Image (spheres, grey):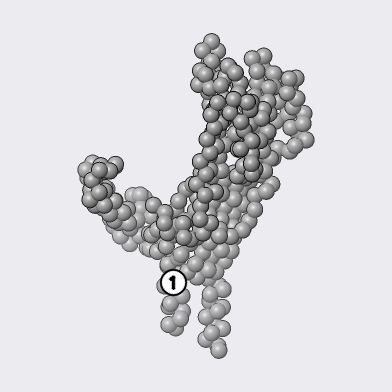
């Protein structure tokens, strides 16, 4: 019995679990996006509300190849879960994004806004 | 004493199950709601949210949406690689093999594929014994991980502003659901 207890204690001592979280950028909320109005808001308005974009896509038009057509914003949250037993371990990483793509027309006015605010849904858990 | 030794040895060996998810799968029915020749960019964005990539050609606008998952199992042996002074030998042999082994064996010759894939696998395992600073690893891994991406691509005609093509590759969604079984079947 004593040996079994010692063995179990050793197994517990050599095991472990880890929960960690990492975020990249500032989260985007729906209230902020409501301030962007298609047909009215400009690039300056979008930059004022969301900051500088993470990526700018050019329209690749022949007469104006550098026309800034799309602003893309991306924020992420990653939650990691790890379980270490003596000879068996599991690891799960879940990354979710807050993503916004703002499309501009020829005048530099917002045409469309695509958004996916899901960073808060990143979760801990097992990999199965 | 024996149990302690067994546990100590076992801590150098580990079976690990891994799953890494990036992004969110599209809402059910969202892809089907996009109609060729009718849906416009706003309809696509309302259905699928923000694209992960946008690119333009002179005539087309391409919106890409992606949900990626990497999963698999590893059987790892943690080794004291610093005890192996392989550096110069590894570098020399590695350079010779890189110069002689083709990266893409002729698919029309099955034997050739088998031979080179075995050689590539064995050499990869041998490299794991090298010290870290020469490109080795502190673990030797058997089995492997599979990276899958559910990808949706929607192509719009820039002059008409409507969807002209769409595609949905969904290897994750079509999976068996068994993480461990799929891992053993991975390439």
Q: Is residue A49 visible?
A: yes
- Could you tell me which secondary element the residue under label 1 belongs to? helix
Q: Is residue A106 left or right of residue B94?
A: right
Residue at x-position 53% and y-position 54%: B19
Q: Nearer the viewer, residue A92 or B161?
A: B161
The quadrant of the picture occupied by the N terminus of chain A is bottom right
- Res. A13 image quadrant: bottom right
- Decide: is A111 above or below B99: above
Residue at x-position 61% and y-position 58%: A125
Q: Nearer the viewer, residue A104 or A55?
A: A104
Q: Is residue B93 left or right of residue A52?
A: left
- Decide: is B119 above or below B36: below
Q: Nearer the viewer, residue B53 or A95?
A: B53
Q: Is residue B93 visible?
A: no
The quadrant of the picture occupied by the C terminus of chain A is bottom right
Residue at x-position 39% and y-position 52%: B187
Total marks shown come to: 1
Q: Is residue B176 left or right of residue A28?
A: left
Which residue in the protein does label 1 denote?
B10
Dot 1 alpha-carbon crowd within 10 angstroms: few under 14, some 14 to 19, many 20 or more: some
- Decide: is B156 above or below A2: above
- Decide: is A13 above or below B78: below
Q: What x and y, as percent, mark residue B171? A: 50, 46
Q: Chain of mark 1?
A: B
Q: What x and y, as percent, mark residue B85? A: 29, 57
Residue at x-position 67% and y-position 27%: B42
Residue at the extreme top of the image, as rendered: A63
């Amino acid at each position: 019995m004593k040996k079994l207890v010692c063995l179990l204690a050793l197994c517990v001592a050599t095991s472990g679990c880890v929960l960690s979280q990492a975020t990249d950028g500032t989260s985007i909320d729906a209230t902020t996006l409501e301030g962007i109005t298609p047909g009215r808001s400009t690039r300056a308005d979008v930059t004022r509300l969301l900051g500088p974009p993470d990526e700018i896509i050019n329209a690749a038009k022949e007469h104006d190849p550098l026309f800034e057509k799309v602003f893309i914003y991306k924020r992420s949250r990653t939650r990691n879960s790890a379980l270490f037993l003596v000879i068996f371990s599991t690891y799960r990483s879940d990354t979710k994004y807050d993503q916004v793509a703002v499309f501009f027309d020829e005048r530099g006015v917002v045409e469309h806004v695509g958004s996916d605010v899901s960073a808060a849904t990143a979760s801990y858990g097992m990999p199965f | 004493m024996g149990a302690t030794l067994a546990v100590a040895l076992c801590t150098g060996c580990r079976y690990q199950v891994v799953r890494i998810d990036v992004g969110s799968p599209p809402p059910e029915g969202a892809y089907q709601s996009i109609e060729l020749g009718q849906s416009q960019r706003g309809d696509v964005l309302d259905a699928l949210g923000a694209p992960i990539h946008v690119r333009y050609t002179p005539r087309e606008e391409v919106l890409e949406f992606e949900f990626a998952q990497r999963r698999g199992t590893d059987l790892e042996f943690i080794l004291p690689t610093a005890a192996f002074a392989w550096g110069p030998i590894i570098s020399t042999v590695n350079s010779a093999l890189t110069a002689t082994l083709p990266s893409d064996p002729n698919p029309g010759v099955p034997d050739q594929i088998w031979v080179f894939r075995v050689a590539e696998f064995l050499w990869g395992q041998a490299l794991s014994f090298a010290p870290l600073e020469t490109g080795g690893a502190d673990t030797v891994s058997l089995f492997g991980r599979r990276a899958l991406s559910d990808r949706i691509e929607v192509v719009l005609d820039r002059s008409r502003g409507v969807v002209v093509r769409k595609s949905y590759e969904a290897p994750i969604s079509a999976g068996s659901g068994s993480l461990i079984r799929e891992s053993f079947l991975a390439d």
